[in-house]
Amino acid sequence: YLGHFGKSELLRVIELTGLQVKKVPHVIGNLIHLRYLCIRSPCLVELPSSIGNLINLQTLDIAKTSVKKLSASFWKISTLRHVIAERLDLPESVGALKNMQALMGLVCLHPWHGNISPLHNMVNLRKLKISGLTSSHSAALSDAFSKLELLIHLELIGTDIPSTLFTNFSMRRLQSLQLTGKMIMQTADTEQRCTLPSLTNLVLKNSKVNHGFIDMVGKLPCLAELRLLSRSYDGQQLTFSPASGFGNLTD
């Protein structure tokens, strides 16, 4: 019965839960006034290329599906504000998505060349969660950080996580940071001042940071919660002292 949606061209909101379907009909592309599309069905593996016709779409929530890739035309919808997924392929090139506010559950399957990444024009991003990061993404990701001045929540997962996000003056609004993957650091990095004045929550896993890094984040003025998970610290002993800071940590 999903095919009947094509006859309801004035629909602006669609939320589907628990449907046992693998594909969404092509006629969904006729709903050009649609602004919000949420589908919760683990069986769903494909959205049609016609989804690129939804020129007024603001939110796509497919976090509870098995969709892994969307058509290139979808990533050119300039009205997009929220894309929420599970493990969705983030293309190497996207449109000028300057209205994007939340990009959650994306996977970097393609290398980024030079300092150019799909994130560069998303200057209004508030929430970002991406995985699959490698050394091929580090330079472009570091450059993108300088443009993401409105970012509040950030989750990065990969084999290489650039430490430059801790010393980037542009991310002064960042409050929550979760990192899974080895932190790529130079000795000079831990000698710099950490410039995340609004950060209240920090979670590290597989990061293998040294004591110098711990001392650096200890000086964050608003840090209230620090979670060091498995393989987050590369050392035999971790000692906290008054000189280490962490004056705002809560029990």
Image (cartoon, rainbow, N blue to C red):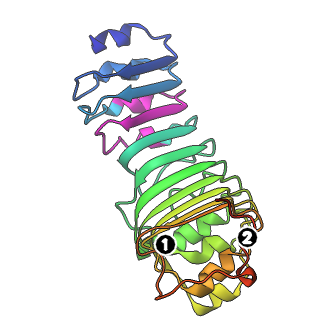
Magenta span of residues? 50-75
The amino acid sitting under disc 1 is Ile
Other residues around mark 2 within 10 Å, as few (<14) / some (14–19) / many (≥20) = many
> Quadrant of the rendered structure where residue 37 is?
top left
Check residue 11 for magenta coloring. no
Check residue 73 for magenta coloring. yes
Q: How many marks?
A: 2
The amino acid sitting under disc 2 is Leu
Residue lying at the far bottom of the rendered structure: 187
Percent coordinates x, y for residue 136 in the rendering: 42, 74
Percent coordinates x, y for residue 188 in the rendering: 64, 91
Please tell me which residue is depicted at 45% across the width and 11% down the height of the picture. Answer: 9
- Residue 115 appearing in the image: no
| Disc sitting over residue 13 in the figure | none
- Describe the element under mark 1 as helix, strand or loop: strand
Quadrant in which the N terminus is drawn: top left
Please tell me which residue is depicted at 46% across the width and 43% down the height of the picture. Answer: 75
Which is nearer the eye, 248 or 221?
248
Q: Is residue 85 left or right of residue 238?
A: left
Residue pointed to by mark 1: 161
Residue pointed to by mark 2: 220
Percent coordinates x, y for residue 236 in the rendering: 46, 88
Please tell me which residue is depicted at 31% across the width and 45% down the height of the picture. Answer: 68
- Measure the alpha-carbon separation of dots 1 and 2: 20 Å
